[in-house]
Image (tube, rainbow, N blue to C red):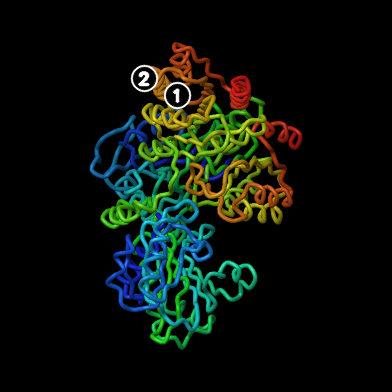
């Protein structure tokens, strides 16, 4: 889960990291109580590049602030509606620093990064002068030793900064205690009053949501208005049923019982001259009900002219997959052609069950893909 | 010879009394895997398909010699189970569980490394050395004994390719799933090294997919050290950016996550690139004869 800016900064603030004074508003009227100007108005959306998209603005006096807030609340950034605006005191920035803790996938260890040149151009700095970003791997079993902080301070030239040590420590604690996969403070601003977290990005691990139930519930509640607009009915259904579903541009609907064969199927569809309408994967432990739900989701996309089901079970059992398909057909009828590839655990039983409802499952994936692409051509 | 396991490996099952654990215990036993013990807290004293169940690893080890373990323990308890296994001194653990929090996976992998144990997974189908031993959930009819090593991030893709190889008369030495990511115990590079050193493996099939940078790392290893032919297929050439394609690790972020950049790295390392799964047997036949 990606936190909104105000949520991320609230977590940091709870760990004693200074943030600017601010109020969160969902209507221009909420700004009436504000007395200190100028104010920075920041649209709350879970994507980067807000500044360049015009979602971060400055106002010198109340009327202007209200007008801009009204405008922001009517806008969206990259498809995400702005449903709240963070009105923040302007702080005097002497220098913009960068600080992040994340999981390094190649070493399976946390990685800490700091730079004396942070801000919006950090990615360019990483590309053009990577030496300006100091990185250090941590040992997850050990935590964050003091010498690492001293090392970062020394090599970024920040060693005289008061509070740097404490802030680095606290950022690491947030990373650790909330099952984050990334905690990034950028910029970490040097102001006349010391270091202040001006903006922050925090990614929490959804797989660990069960350990932070109250926090996740609250964060999700607060994010309700920021969900990407324009979800298709298939996407909505997929979200409700917990089905892995990605919308694509073509007309061959697909369901697979593995991620790898699912991606291969997309590639083969394109090689055969077709184009997939979606990606849908059941996951290893799926049963009949998951299969039926996946069919409901995929057929909710009107652009899918044919549905291709590719099954090669290890953990998934073909008798159960067939049950899912037949019970779907019993309830919804056959609104469009179904092409089924089936092999794996208990495939004889599965194939016999499908035969009874008039479906001849094939053994080979490419044969199934070619049939589906041909049927789409005939249908259009 | 095979990698990681052999005909004589004595195996312990964690989570043996659960639905999946118990079903897969029977399937592995039928295949000939030497299963000596199972562990489920609170279920000690039971038997599952003739296998004695213990409350603790330590108790199981008092009465049995164990070379390897496989875990079917649910995500919320998977870290604890793995730590118990490592503390017991079991050298090789397959973690099949999907959805373990990343920080728990980091703990498992790093603790294992500090104690000299090896982790395969998580979110892996495990491995099979056809005709000898199976420590995983592979549909075994799709595989046959032979001399091609297969490694894959995806379980299903390794079944797909195993089946095509077998149908074309090409057997496999060992088929290894490293897991869907985004964190891995044994990496592609680790498995490549084992295949390179295994006298019974003549060629290797590397099944990669979009997301992350592990194929680039594997390519660097291949370029430097591999003398055996490596055939590679990268799934997800047509996957869109930014979408999670089923596996937690299969999401294209940045250039290195794309199929093109992986294919390019592998090709320049001397790998033979297959466009589709059905090309793999043809390429192998040409290379190995």
Between circles 2 and 1, the one closer to the viewer is 2
Q: Which residue is nearer to you in this view: A88 or A71? A: A71
Q: Is residue A21 above or below residue B221?
A: below
Quarter of the C terminus of chain A within the rendering? top right
Q: Residue at x 49, y 29 (%)?
A: A302
As measured in the structure, the alpha-carbon distance from the residue carrying label 2 to the one carrying label 1 is 20 Å
- Toward the front, the furthest residue is A63
Quarter of the N terminus of chain A within the rendering? bottom left
Q: Find residue B205 and report its image quarter.
A: top right
Q: Is residue B123 above or below residue B276?
A: below
For residue A178, side relative to residue A304 (left or right): left
Looking at the image, tell me whether mark 2 or mark 1 is earlier in sequence order: 1
Residue B67 is at least partly visible in this image: no
Residue A292 horizontal/vertical position (percent): 40, 27
Residue A12 horizontal/vertical position (percent): 35, 70
Disc 1 element? helix
Label drawn at residue A197: none
Q: Find residue A121 and report its image quarter.
A: bottom right
Q: Which residue is nearer to you in this view: A38 or A257? A: A38
For residue A139, side relative to residue B174 (left or right): left
Q: Residue at x 46, y 49 (%)?
A: B92
Q: Is residue B216 above or below residue A167?
A: above
Category of crowding for the residue at label 2, using alpha-carbon neighbours closer than 10 angstroms: few (below 14), some (14–19), many (at least 20): few
Q: Chain of mark 2?
A: A
Q: Which residue is mark 2?
A: A331
Label drawn at residue A318: 1
């Amino acid at each position: 889960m990606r936190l909104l800016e105000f949520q991320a900064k609230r977590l940091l603030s709870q760990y004693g990291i200074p943030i600017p004074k601010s109020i969160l508003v969902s209507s221009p009227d909420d700004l009436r109580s504000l007395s200190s100007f100028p104010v920075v108005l920041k649209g709350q959306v879970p994507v980067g590049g807000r500044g360049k998209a015009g979602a971060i603005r400055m106002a010198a006096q109340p009327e202007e602030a209200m007008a801009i807030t009204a405008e922001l609340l009517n806008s969206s950034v990259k498809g995400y509606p702005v449903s709240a605006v963070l009105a923040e005191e302007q702080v005097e920035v002497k220098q913009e620093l960068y600080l992040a803790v994340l999981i390094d996938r190649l070493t399976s260890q946390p990685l800490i990064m700091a730079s004396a040149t942070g801000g919006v151009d950090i990615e360019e700095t990483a590309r053009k002068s990577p030496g300006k970003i100091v990185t250090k791997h941590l040992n997850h079993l050990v935590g964050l030793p003091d010498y690492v902080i001293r090392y970062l301070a020394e090599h970024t030239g920040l060693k005289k900064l008061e509070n740097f040590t404490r802030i680095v420590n606290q950022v690491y604690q947030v990373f650790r205690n909330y099952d984050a996969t990334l905690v990034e403070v950028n910029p970490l601003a040097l102001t006349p009053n010391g270091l202040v977290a001006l903006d922050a990005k925090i990614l929490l691990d959804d797989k660990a949501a069960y350990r932070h139930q109250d926090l996740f519930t609250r964060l999700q509640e607060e994010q309700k208005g920021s969900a990407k607009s324009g979800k298709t009915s298939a996407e909505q259904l997929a979200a409700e049923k917990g089905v892995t579903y990605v919308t694509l541009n073509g007309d061959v609907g697909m369901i697979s019982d593995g991620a790898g064969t699912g991606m291969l199927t997309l590639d083969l569809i394109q090689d055969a001259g077709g184009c997939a309408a979606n990606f849908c994967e059941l996951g290893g432990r799926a049963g009949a009900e998951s299969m039926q739900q996946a069919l409901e989701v995929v057929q909710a996309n009107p652009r899918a002219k044919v549905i291709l089901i590719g099954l090669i079970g290890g953990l998934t059992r073909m008798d159960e997959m067939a049950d899912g398909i037949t019970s779907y057909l019993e309830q919804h009828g056959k609104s469009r052609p179904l092409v089924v590839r089936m092999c794996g655990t208990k495939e004889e039983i599965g194939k016999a069950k499908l035969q009874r409802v008039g479906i001849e499952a094939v053994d080979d994936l490419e044969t199934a893909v070619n049939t589906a692409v041909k049927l789409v051509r005939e249908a259009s | 010879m095979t990698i990681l396991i052999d005909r004589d490996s004595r195996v312990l099952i964690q989570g043996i009394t659960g639905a999946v654990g118990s079903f897969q215990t029977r399937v592995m036993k039928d295949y000939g895997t030497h299963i000596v013990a199972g562990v489920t807290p609170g279920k000690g004293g039971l038997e599952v398909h003739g296998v004695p169940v213990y409350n603790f690893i330590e108790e199981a080890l008092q009465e049995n010699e164990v070379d390897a373990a496989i875990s079917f323990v649910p995500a919320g308890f998977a870290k604890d189970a793995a730590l118990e296994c490592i503390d017991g001194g079991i050298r090789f653990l397959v973690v099949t569980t999907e959805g373990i929090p990343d920080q728990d996976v980091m703990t498992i992998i790093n603790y294992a490394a500090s104690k000299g144990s090896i982790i395969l997974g998580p979110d892996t189908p495990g491995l099979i050395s056809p005709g000898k031993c199976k420590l995983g959930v592979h549909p075994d009819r799709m595989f046959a004994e032979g001399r091609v090593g297969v490694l894959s991030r995806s379980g299903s893709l390794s079944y797909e390719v195993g089946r095509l190889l077998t149908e074309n008369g090409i057997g496999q030495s060992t088929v290894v799933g490293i897991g869907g990511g985004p964190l891995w115990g044994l990496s592609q590079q680790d498995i490549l090294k084992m295949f390179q050193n295994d006298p019974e493996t003549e060629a290797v099939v590397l099944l990669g997919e979009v997301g992350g940078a592990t194929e680039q790392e594997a390519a660097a290893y291949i370029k430097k050290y591999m003398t055996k032919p490596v055939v590679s297929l990268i799934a997800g050439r047509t996957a869109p950016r930014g979408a999670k394609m089923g596996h937690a690790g299969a999401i294209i972020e940045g250039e290195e996550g794309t199929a093109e950049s992986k294919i390019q790295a592998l090709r320049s390392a001397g790998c033979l690139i297959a466009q589709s799964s059905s090309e793999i047997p043809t390429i192998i036949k040409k290379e190995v004869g």
